[in-house]
Image (cartoon, grey):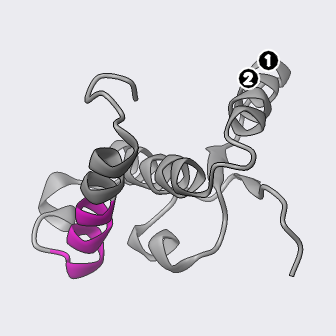
Amino acid sequence: GLDCVVIVVSSVKPEIDIIDNEFDDYLVKPTDQETLIELIEEWLDVRGHEQRREYQALESKREMLESHESNQRLTGNDKYTDLTDRIDTLQDAISVPDDEY
């Protein structure tokens, strides 16, 4: 019931199942202090903007999956399709330019 940002830092490479997990961002080890600080600052910028926060969390999952899963595994996966559809809907609702992320 806490309203806080959850950033997972793990040595486990993400798989499609991360879509179901409730976290805001995911970093794969090794990472450095500068990257973590920048990520925290990004999340502080979206405090109080729930649609923007949801968008950023889903976009993080999409980027993580696309960098660790093959296009073949993602294409046609219902969870991934739902994820990208929701990102598109939020992007339109909050007027995020296509090149911002």
Q: Nearer the viewer, residue 50 or 28?
A: 50
Q: In the image, is 57 to the left or to the right of 22?
A: left
The quadrant in which the N terminus is found is: bottom right
The quadrant in which the C terminus is found is: top left
- Is 84 drawn above or below residue 27 in the view shown? below
Q: Residue at x 37, y 42 (%)?
A: 67
Tell which residue pokes out farthest to the right in this image: 2
Q: Residues within 10 Å of mark 1 (few under 14, many from 20)?
A: few
Amino acid type, callout 1: Glu
Q: Residue at x 32, y 66 (%)?
A: 83
Q: Which residue in the protein does label 2 denote?
A: 38
Q: Residue at x 38, y 24 (%)?
A: 100
Q: Nearer the viewer, residue 50 or 62?
A: 50
Magenta span: helix, strand or loop, mainly? helix
- Image position, residue 38 (x, y; %): 73, 23
Q: Quadrant of residue 76?
A: bottom left
- Image position, residue 16 (x, y; %): 39, 70
- Is 40 drawn above or below residue 24 in the view shown? above
Q: Is residue 81 magenta?
A: yes
Q: Which residues are magenta?
A: 77-86
Q: Are marks 2 and 1 in contact (CB under 8 Å)?
A: yes
Secondary structure of the residue carrying tag 1 is helix
Q: Which residue in the protein does label 1 denote?
A: 34
Q: Is residue 66 magenta?
A: no
